[in-house]
Amino acid sequence: MNDNKKPLYFITGNDHKFDEVYKSFREENINFDLLQSKIETLEIQANTIKEVAEFKIKSVKEIFKDSYFVEDAGFFVEDPLNGFPGVYSSYAFKTIGNDGILKMIDDYQSPRARFEAIIALYYKPTNSIHYFRGEVKGSVSKLKRGTAGFGFDPIFIPDEIPNKTFSELSTKEKNQISHRGRALAKLIEFLRTQV
Ligand code: IMP
Protein backbone atom coordinates (compact mmCIF):
# COMPACT_ATOMS: atom_id res chain seq x y z
CA MET A 1 0.00 0.00 0.00
CA ASN A 2 1.23 3.50 -0.88
CA ASP A 3 1.65 5.47 2.39
CA ASN A 4 0.32 8.73 0.96
CA LYS A 5 -2.91 7.19 -0.16
CA LYS A 6 -5.96 6.57 1.99
CA PRO A 7 -7.30 3.03 2.17
CA LEU A 8 -10.67 2.38 0.58
CA TYR A 9 -12.23 -1.05 1.02
CA PHE A 10 -14.37 -2.79 -1.57
CA ILE A 11 -16.33 -5.46 0.29
CA THR A 12 -16.93 -8.37 -2.05
CA GLY A 13 -16.36 -12.09 -2.07
CA ASN A 14 -16.42 -12.03 -5.87
CA ASP A 15 -12.83 -11.88 -7.16
CA HIS A 16 -14.02 -11.13 -10.73
CA LYS A 17 -15.78 -8.00 -9.52
CA PHE A 18 -12.79 -6.92 -7.49
CA ASP A 19 -10.50 -7.45 -10.49
CA GLU A 20 -12.72 -5.29 -12.73
CA VAL A 21 -12.90 -2.49 -10.18
CA TYR A 22 -9.21 -2.70 -9.33
CA LYS A 23 -8.22 -2.37 -13.00
CA SER A 24 -10.38 0.75 -13.37
CA PHE A 25 -8.98 2.28 -10.21
CA ARG A 26 -5.41 1.66 -11.32
CA GLU A 27 -5.93 3.84 -14.37
CA GLU A 28 -7.22 6.74 -12.32
CA ASN A 29 -4.97 9.13 -10.54
CA ILE A 30 -6.82 9.32 -7.26
CA ASN A 31 -5.67 9.49 -3.70
CA PHE A 32 -7.08 6.15 -2.55
CA ASP A 33 -5.67 2.65 -2.32
CA LEU A 34 -8.25 0.04 -3.20
CA LEU A 35 -8.28 -3.02 -0.92
CA GLN A 36 -10.53 -6.05 -0.96
CA SER A 37 -12.44 -7.16 2.11
CA LYS A 38 -14.34 -10.46 2.17
CA ILE A 39 -16.11 -9.71 5.43
CA GLU A 40 -19.68 -11.06 5.60
CA THR A 41 -22.42 -8.47 5.15
CA LEU A 42 -26.15 -8.95 5.66
CA GLU A 43 -27.87 -9.79 2.39
CA ILE A 44 -31.64 -9.24 2.31
CA GLN A 45 -34.17 -10.07 -0.38
CA ALA A 46 -35.76 -6.78 -1.46
CA ASN A 47 -37.61 -5.24 -4.39
CA THR A 48 -34.71 -3.10 -5.58
CA ILE A 49 -30.96 -3.47 -5.86
CA LYS A 50 -30.54 -0.20 -4.00
CA GLU A 51 -32.33 -1.56 -0.91
CA VAL A 52 -30.05 -4.61 -0.93
CA ALA A 53 -26.95 -2.39 -1.16
CA GLU A 54 -28.26 -0.03 1.54
CA PHE A 55 -28.82 -2.86 3.99
CA LYS A 56 -25.41 -4.36 3.26
CA ILE A 57 -23.49 -1.11 3.73
CA LYS A 58 -25.20 -0.29 7.01
CA SER A 59 -24.66 -3.81 8.38
CA VAL A 60 -20.88 -3.35 8.77
CA LYS A 61 -20.55 0.32 9.64
CA GLU A 62 -19.18 -0.32 13.14
CA ILE A 63 -16.38 -2.50 11.75
CA PHE A 64 -14.45 -0.20 9.42
CA LYS A 65 -12.52 2.87 10.47
CA ASP A 66 -11.78 3.71 6.82
CA SER A 67 -14.21 4.38 3.98
CA TYR A 68 -15.67 1.34 2.24
CA PHE A 69 -18.16 0.41 -0.44
CA VAL A 70 -20.31 -2.48 -1.62
CA GLU A 71 -21.75 -3.10 -5.05
CA ASP A 72 -24.92 -4.94 -6.03
CA ALA A 73 -25.95 -5.84 -9.52
CA GLY A 74 -28.82 -7.48 -11.33
CA PHE A 75 -29.55 -8.86 -14.79
CA PHE A 76 -32.99 -7.89 -16.09
CA VAL A 77 -34.41 -9.63 -19.17
CA GLU A 78 -36.99 -6.96 -19.98
CA ASP A 79 -38.40 -8.69 -23.02
CA PRO A 80 -39.79 -11.42 -22.91
CA LEU A 81 -39.27 -12.06 -19.14
CA ASN A 82 -40.59 -8.75 -17.73
CA GLY A 83 -37.36 -8.05 -15.86
CA PHE A 84 -36.68 -11.54 -14.46
CA PRO A 85 -34.30 -12.49 -12.83
CA GLY A 86 -33.60 -8.87 -11.61
CA VAL A 87 -33.24 -8.88 -7.83
CA TYR A 88 -33.25 -12.70 -7.94
CA SER A 89 -30.22 -12.80 -10.27
CA SER A 90 -27.88 -14.48 -7.85
CA TYR A 91 -30.38 -17.22 -7.02
CA ALA A 92 -31.34 -17.68 -10.69
CA PHE A 93 -27.69 -17.96 -11.67
CA LYS A 94 -27.03 -20.60 -9.00
CA THR A 95 -30.12 -22.62 -9.84
CA ILE A 96 -30.94 -22.43 -13.58
CA GLY A 97 -27.83 -20.58 -14.82
CA ASN A 98 -27.35 -19.21 -18.30
CA ASP A 99 -28.75 -22.37 -19.88
CA GLY A 100 -31.97 -21.97 -17.92
CA ILE A 101 -32.36 -18.33 -18.96
CA LEU A 102 -31.76 -19.24 -22.61
CA LYS A 103 -34.34 -21.99 -22.35
CA MET A 104 -36.94 -19.58 -20.93
CA ILE A 105 -36.32 -17.15 -23.78
CA ASP A 106 -36.46 -20.07 -26.21
CA ASP A 107 -36.70 -18.86 -29.82
CA TYR A 108 -38.01 -15.38 -29.00
CA GLN A 109 -36.89 -13.16 -31.86
CA SER A 110 -35.21 -10.14 -30.25
CA PRO A 111 -34.84 -10.47 -26.49
CA ARG A 112 -33.85 -7.29 -24.63
CA ALA A 113 -31.93 -7.15 -21.37
CA ARG A 114 -30.01 -4.79 -19.13
CA PHE A 115 -27.62 -4.92 -16.22
CA GLU A 116 -27.94 -2.50 -13.35
CA ALA A 117 -25.37 -1.84 -10.62
CA ILE A 118 -25.53 0.21 -7.46
CA ILE A 119 -22.41 1.13 -5.56
CA ALA A 120 -23.02 2.21 -1.97
CA LEU A 121 -20.14 4.09 -0.38
CA TYR A 122 -19.76 4.70 3.33
CA TYR A 123 -17.61 7.81 3.41
CA LYS A 124 -16.02 7.99 6.84
CA PRO A 125 -14.79 11.61 6.92
CA THR A 126 -18.40 12.81 6.85
CA ASN A 127 -20.07 9.59 8.09
CA SER A 128 -22.35 9.67 5.09
CA ILE A 129 -23.63 7.11 2.60
CA HIS A 130 -23.57 7.86 -1.14
CA TYR A 131 -25.09 5.85 -4.00
CA PHE A 132 -23.82 5.59 -7.59
CA ARG A 133 -25.85 3.85 -10.27
CA GLY A 134 -24.82 2.39 -13.60
CA GLU A 135 -26.74 0.63 -16.35
CA VAL A 136 -26.04 -1.02 -19.69
CA LYS A 137 -28.66 -2.06 -22.21
CA GLY A 138 -28.42 -4.80 -24.77
CA SER A 139 -29.77 -8.07 -26.09
CA VAL A 140 -29.48 -11.74 -25.21
CA SER A 141 -27.37 -14.04 -27.33
CA LYS A 142 -28.91 -17.25 -28.74
CA LEU A 143 -25.97 -19.25 -27.38
CA LYS A 144 -23.33 -18.75 -24.68
CA ARG A 145 -20.24 -17.16 -26.22
CA GLY A 146 -16.79 -16.24 -24.90
CA THR A 147 -14.68 -17.22 -21.93
CA ALA A 148 -13.93 -14.00 -20.04
CA GLY A 149 -15.91 -12.47 -17.19
CA PHE A 150 -18.47 -14.22 -15.02
CA GLY A 151 -22.17 -14.71 -14.34
CA PHE A 152 -24.42 -13.76 -17.24
CA ASP A 153 -21.56 -12.31 -19.32
CA PRO A 154 -21.61 -15.15 -21.92
CA ILE A 155 -25.21 -14.38 -22.94
CA PHE A 156 -25.32 -10.56 -22.81
CA ILE A 157 -24.62 -8.47 -25.93
CA PRO A 158 -24.25 -4.74 -25.17
CA ASP A 159 -25.83 -2.29 -27.62
CA GLU A 160 -22.49 -0.44 -27.84
CA ILE A 161 -20.67 -3.52 -29.25
CA PRO A 162 -23.46 -5.45 -30.96
CA ASN A 163 -21.36 -8.32 -32.33
CA LYS A 164 -19.85 -9.45 -29.01
CA THR A 165 -21.02 -10.79 -25.66
CA PHE A 166 -19.50 -9.38 -22.46
CA SER A 167 -17.49 -12.63 -22.26
CA GLU A 168 -15.84 -11.83 -25.57
CA LEU A 169 -14.52 -8.47 -24.32
CA SER A 170 -11.38 -7.66 -22.35
CA THR A 171 -11.89 -6.31 -18.83
CA LYS A 172 -10.95 -2.86 -20.09
CA GLU A 173 -13.53 -2.97 -22.89
CA LYS A 174 -16.23 -4.26 -20.54
CA ASN A 175 -15.43 -1.60 -17.92
CA GLN A 176 -15.88 1.20 -20.46
CA ILE A 177 -19.54 0.37 -21.06
CA SER A 178 -20.67 -1.89 -18.25
CA HIS A 179 -23.14 -1.13 -15.47
CA ARG A 180 -20.36 -1.54 -12.91
CA GLY A 181 -17.89 0.54 -14.91
CA ARG A 182 -20.42 3.36 -15.19
CA ALA A 183 -21.29 3.32 -11.50
CA LEU A 184 -17.58 3.22 -10.73
CA ALA A 185 -16.86 6.25 -12.91
CA LYS A 186 -19.37 8.20 -10.78
CA LEU A 187 -17.77 6.94 -7.55
CA ILE A 188 -14.31 7.98 -8.78
CA GLU A 189 -15.63 11.42 -9.73
CA PHE A 190 -17.02 11.81 -6.21
CA LEU A 191 -13.73 10.70 -4.61
CA ARG A 192 -11.79 13.20 -6.73
CA THR A 193 -13.85 16.07 -5.38
CA GLN A 194 -13.18 15.01 -1.78
CA VAL A 195 -9.41 15.45 -1.71
P1 IMP B 1 -24.49 -9.74 -7.16
O1 IMP B 1 -24.39 -8.28 -7.30
O2 IMP B 1 -23.14 -10.33 -6.94
O3 IMP B 1 -25.50 -10.18 -6.15
O4 IMP B 1 -24.93 -10.28 -8.57
C1 IMP B 1 -26.15 -10.92 -8.83
C2 IMP B 1 -25.98 -11.92 -9.96
O5 IMP B 1 -25.71 -11.22 -11.17
C3 IMP B 1 -24.83 -12.90 -9.74
O6 IMP B 1 -25.24 -14.18 -10.14
C4 IMP B 1 -23.74 -12.39 -10.64
O7 IMP B 1 -23.00 -13.47 -11.17
C5 IMP B 1 -24.51 -11.67 -11.75
N1 IMP B 1 -23.73 -10.52 -12.19
C6 IMP B 1 -23.43 -9.41 -11.48
N2 IMP B 1 -22.64 -8.59 -12.20
C7 IMP B 1 -22.44 -9.21 -13.37
C8 IMP B 1 -21.68 -8.88 -14.53
O8 IMP B 1 -21.00 -7.85 -14.62
N3 IMP B 1 -21.73 -9.77 -15.53
C9 IMP B 1 -22.44 -10.93 -15.47
N4 IMP B 1 -23.14 -11.30 -14.43
C10 IMP B 1 -23.14 -10.44 -13.37
Image (cartoon, helix red, strand yellow):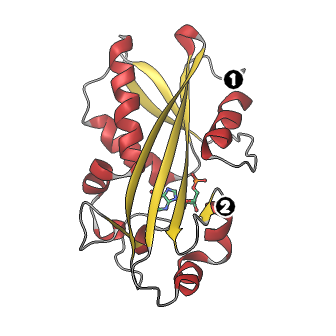
Position of residue 34 measured from the top left corner of the image (x, y, whole percent): 42, 31
User: Which quarter of the rendered picture does the C terminus lie within?
Assistant: top left
Badge 2: how crowded within 10 Å, few (<14), some, or many (20+)? Answer: some
Is residue 10 toward the left or the right of residue 93 in the image?
A: left
Q: Which mark is residue 61?
A: 1
Q: Which of 49 and 25 is in front in this view?
A: 49
Rendering coords of residue 74 (x, y %): 55, 56
Is residue 75 visible in this depiction of the protein? yes
Q: Nearer the viewer, residue 161 or 69?
A: 161
Q: Locate residue 52, reporting x and y percent.
A: 67, 43
x, y percent for residue 29: 25, 25
Of 193 and 37, the residue lying toward us: 193
Q: Badge 1: how crowded within 10 Å, few (<14), some, or many (20+)?
A: some
Q: What's the amino acid at mark 1? A: Lys
Residue at x 66%, y 34% (from the top left corner):
54
Secondary structure of the residue carrying tag 1 is loop
Q: Which mark is residue 163?
A: none
Secondary-structure class at tag 2: loop
The amino acid type of the residue labelled 2 equals Tyr
Mark 2, residue position: 88
Q: In which quarter of the image is residue 141?
A: bottom left
Q: Quadrant of the N terminus?
A: top left
Residue at 35% over, 65% down:
166
Of the residues tagged 2 and 1, which is closer to the observer?
Answer: 2
Say whether disc 2 or disc 1 marks the residue closer to the N-terminus: 1
Asked if residue 4 can be seen in this view, the reply is no
Occupied quadrant, residue 61: top right
Locate residue 67 relative to residue 5 in the image: left or right. right
Label pair 2/1, CB-CB below 8 angstroms: no
The front one of 24 and 182 is 182
Which residue is painted at 36% across and 74% down in the image? Answer: 147
